[in-house]
Every structure is written in structure tokens, then in C-alpha cells.
Image (tube, grey):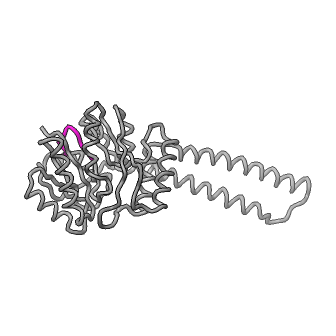
């Protein structure tokens, strides 16, 4: 029986593959003789998969899944969790910003009776001021507008028990936000604090566009506040419009102080039109996500793996 599965999503990380393998092997060996390292190649364009494939030939404890294209970090992690066999699974990125040595602390804490132990960042080395500020702002706002307690200053680096893994496998939505889903699942959760390192080598695959998309997924998956804001804005604009209409009638029929083609009419039309477009856009975001899930397409497509293919393919289409 596998005690520990280490799930590592990979996207263009050829310079870090060997290092993270060696460090994870060292830590996992100290925890148990029964473990597996699962690399999920998320459509890398460099030699990441070739290096992973070579490691798998040398070490039977190395498993891999290669996706047919880049499906995104959250889905790549989900693919690894779908096929992992461990009593516990650790999620860690290949860029080495999250030190693999912390896995031992996470596992030790989990064995105290916690189903989720997330790594909480004390410091974030090597990140721009913009990313640090926006990340802090986003997670604090998300905590305020959702009914679940998503831990602050945490990423996906954490350990989860088999109970949590099995629940996550029953949550096949297309717009994955795993840290929110894990918080939603509940069970006993705890944290371990650590200092995040700089990226070891290479370039981050998390562009601003991907960060914004992840933020949208988090908000729309766990909060209806944008829809409520749209509704409130509609009532507010209607009230303002009614007041302007009353004033226009007063100016036209009572004070007789008006100018044909009054500018305020244009301003009102533009204002109302802008609010309507924003509201339609917010509703459209939710409808788009509903549409994606109704189509019921596989969450990911596997092009190569050294795990029982029929078993993995069946899980990917659930």
C-alpha cells in the first residue's frame, strides 16, 4: 500500500526536474518506504517530458502522465490526484519555490489527525511587489465574499488525506480552484508556516492573464456576490434615472429652464448603457461556466503514461 504520493504539475520546467526529483526522493524516503512521485506534464514545449520519462525508466517509483496539451495548472494537479494511490497526497510545484523539505513537516502534522495541512507563507522571495500586493488583496477579498474559510497566504502546496482526495474526485467542474474546493470539503485542517524561496530556474508559467483567470474562477466558483452587485447596481441606476427624469419634467413644464438636446440626457444614456453592459458581462461569465460544465467534456486528455491507461482514461472522463 502506497503511503505517500507526491503530485508535481510540470510546464516547461526542464531545468528543475532533476533537482526536485532528488529532493522529493530524499524527503519521501525519510517518511516511508512506500511512496510514489507523480509528474504531470501539462503540455510542456521543452524537454521536461523526456527528462521525466528517463527518470521513470531508472526509478519505478516515478509515475507520469503527459497531457495532450496545456490544460492549466489546476487541471494538471487534478489529473495527478485522480490517479495517485497514496494514503496521503502532497501537491507541490516543480519550480522549487516551495521547499520539498517542508513535506516532512506537513506529513508529521497530518499524522496528528488532520486531513488537510496547508503550507502558509511567512515570506515570498523573488516575487514582484505587484504580485505580492495583488495576491494579498485577492485572497482577503475572496475570504470576505465567500461563505467558506479559504486560508490566507497559501497556495496549492499542502498535504491531503485519502478522504479528501476521494471527495475532490467527485467535483469535476471545468473551472478548477483547488484551494477553494479543499476548503469547501472541510474535515480537520491545520497549517505549517514556512519561508517561500525564489524560483530555482526558468520562467514562471503563471502570466498575468492566467492569474486573472484563476481569480475569476475562484470568485465565480465560490461566490454569488458579483451577481448581487449587478442587481444592486440595477436598482441604484434605476433610482438615479427616475430622479433625473423627475428633474427633467420639472425643468420642462414648471421652471421652463431647459435647453433642447440637454447634455444630461446623453450622460444618463451612456451611464445606464455602461451599467447594463457590465451586468450582462457578469451574467455571461456565470453562464459560460455553466455551459462548460453542461457539455461534460473530459477534464483532460492523456497522451502518454506509465500507469494503467484504461484506469487513468476512465477517471479522466468522469
Point 47% across, 37% down: residue? 147
Quadrant in which residue 201 is drawn: bottom left
Does residue 211 sit above or below 235 in this rendering?
below
Specify the quadrant of the image occupied by residue 272.
Answer: bottom right
Observer able to see residue 111: yes
Specify the segment rendered in magenta. Answer: 83-90
Residue 144 is a magenta residue = no
Measured as percent of width and height from the top left, residue 283 is found at 51, 50
Q: Give the farthest residue toward the right.
A: 255
- Give the residue displayed 86% in from the left and 56% down from the top: 252
Left or right of 281: which side holds 309? left
**Quadrant including the N terminus:** top left
Instruction: Please name whichever residue, 200 or 2, is drawn nearer the observer in this view of the structure.
Output: 200
Number of on-image labels: 0
| Image point (86%, 52%), residue name | 250
Rendered location of residue 227, percent (x, y): 54, 45
What is the x, y in percent for residue 280?
Answer: 54, 53
Residue at 46%, 49% in the rendered image: 286
- Give the residue at the far bottom of this rendering: 46
Q: Percent position (x, y) of residue 135? A: 46, 53
Q: Is residue 294 visible?
A: no
Amino acid at each position: 500500500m502506497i503511503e505517500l504520493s507526491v503530485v508535481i504539475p510540470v510546464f516547461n520546467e526542464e531545468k528543475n526536474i532533476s533537482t526536485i526529483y532528488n529532493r522529493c526522493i530524499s524527503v519521501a524516503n525519510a517518511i516511508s518506504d512506500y511512496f510514489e512521485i507523480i509528474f504531470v506534464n501539462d503540455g510542456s514545449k521543452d524537454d521536461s517530458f523526456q527528462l521525466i520519462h528517463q527518470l521513470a525508466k531508472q526509478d519505478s517509483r516515478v509515475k507520469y502522465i503527459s497531457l495532450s496539451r496545456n490544460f492549466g495548472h489546476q487541471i494538471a494537479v487534478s489529473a495527478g490526484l485522480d490517479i495517485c494511490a497514496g494514503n496521503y497526497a502532497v501537491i507541490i510545484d516543480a519550480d522549487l519555490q516551495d521547499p520539498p523539505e517542508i513535506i516532512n513537516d506537513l506529513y508529521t502534522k497530518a499524522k496528528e489527525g488532520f486531513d488537510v495541512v496547508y503550507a502558509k507563507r511567512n515570506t515570498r522571495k523573488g516575487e514582484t511587489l505587484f504580485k505580492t500586493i495583488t495576491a494579498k488583496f485577492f485572497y482577503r477579498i475572496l475570504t470576505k465574499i465567500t461563505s467558506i474559510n479559504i486560508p490566507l497566504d497559501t497556495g496549492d502546496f499542502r498535504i491531503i488525506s485519502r478522504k479528501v482526495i476521494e471527495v475532490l474526485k467527485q467535483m469535476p467542474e471545468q473551472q478548477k480552484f483547488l484551494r477553494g474546493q479543499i476548503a469547501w470539503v472541510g474535515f480537520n485542517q491545520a497549517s505549517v508556516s514556512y519561508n517561500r524561496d525564489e524560483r530555482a530556474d526558468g520562467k514562471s508559467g503563471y502570466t498575468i492573464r492566467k492569474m486573472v483567470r484563476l481569480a475569476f474562477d475562484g470568485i465565480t466558483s465560490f461566490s454569488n456576490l458579483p451577481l448581487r452587485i449587478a442587481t444592486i447596481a440595477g436598482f441604484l441606476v434605476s433610482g438615479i434615472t427616475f430622479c433625473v427624469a423627475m428633474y427633467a419634467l420639472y425643468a420642462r413644464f414648471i421652471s421652463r429652464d431647459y435647453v433642447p438636446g440637454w447634455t444630461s440626457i446623453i450622460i444618463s444614456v451612456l451611464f445606464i448603457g455602461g451599467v447594463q453592459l457590465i451586468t450582462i458581462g457578469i451574467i455571461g461569465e456565470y453562464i459560460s461556466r455553466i455551459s462548460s460544465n453542461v457539455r461534460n467534456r473530459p477534464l483532460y486528455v492523456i497522451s502518454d503514461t506509465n500507469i494503467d491507461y484504461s484506469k487513468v482514461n476512465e477517471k479522466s472522463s468522469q
